[in-house]
Image (spheres, rainbow, N blue to C red):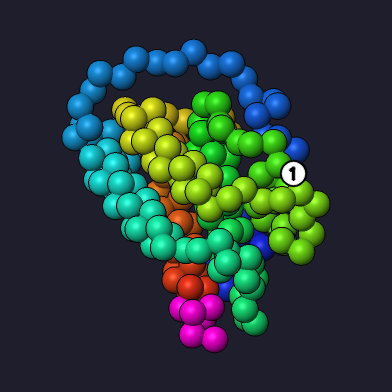
Amino acid sequence: MEHFREYSVVIVEFPLQNPTSDLEQIHAKSHDERYNRVEKREGGIVMNEEMVVKQLDMMRSVLLNEIKDIEETEADIIPNGFPNSLRWQLGHTYLSVEYLVFAKSGRTPVIPEDYPTLFGGGTHPDQWEVKGPSLHELRQQLTEQKERLLNDLKGSTSESLREPFQPGPYTFETVGEMLLFTLYHESEHIGLIKGLKRTIRHS
């Protein structure tokens, strides 16, 4: 079962094997509904998909803007009081969405082979046995991932996850609930990225 390890932010832990290995083959569904459709599911819960999409778009745009000026010379510095580097923060953010959103919704995640051991919860750059990806690669992957989030998940907020996800006392059962959780998770890492940049540049 996935659980959380707390540093200064919530860190999502993943199984270290490639999470695509046990994915079921799921036929893609055709979704022609408009983005502003209101999703309803059993129990009377209502989720406005347009609002979720706007938040996803905004949050990832904020992240991409925040990381655009990071230099390779800064990417692996870990100041005192911080659990990981800037490079790790970017990779972990990317991996989290692939695992929590795409894999858990039954879609095929795009996860480079080494990413679970480089960027999974509980990992640390000091333990890396292979070289991490360049900042250019990570920026490209996060940009491309944004497009998949906005396009591939259209009309899916009320879909059930392959299995419920339970972070602590909470239970998330739908794609929409998981998307909202990833917004929270990504905002935490944006804050940590800002703190790392500020500390590195003023030390």
Above or below: residue 150 compared with residue 74: above
Find residue 99 and report its image quarter: top right
Question: Residue 136 or 86: which is nearer the viewer?
Answer: 136
Find residue 179 and report its image quarter: top left
Question: Is residue 80 magenta-colored?
Answer: no
State whether residue 124 appears in this view: yes
Q: Which residue is mark 1?
A: 16
Question: Residue 174 or 115: which is nearer the viewer?
Answer: 115
- At x 61%, y 36%, the residue is 111
Please provide percent x and percent y for residue 45. 32, 41
State whether residue 42 appears in this view: no
Please provide percent x and percent y for residue 15. 72, 43
Quadrant of the rendering where the C terminus is positioned: bottom right
Please provide percent x and percent y for residue 2. 67, 48
- At x 72%, y 51%, the residue is 131
Question: Residue 107 or 40: which is nearer the viewer?
Answer: 107
Secondary structure found at label 1 = loop
Residue numbers of the magenta segment? 198-203
- At x 57%, y 45%, the residue is 95
| Left or right, residue 37 beside residue 107 | left
Q: Specify the amino acid type for callout 1.
A: Leu
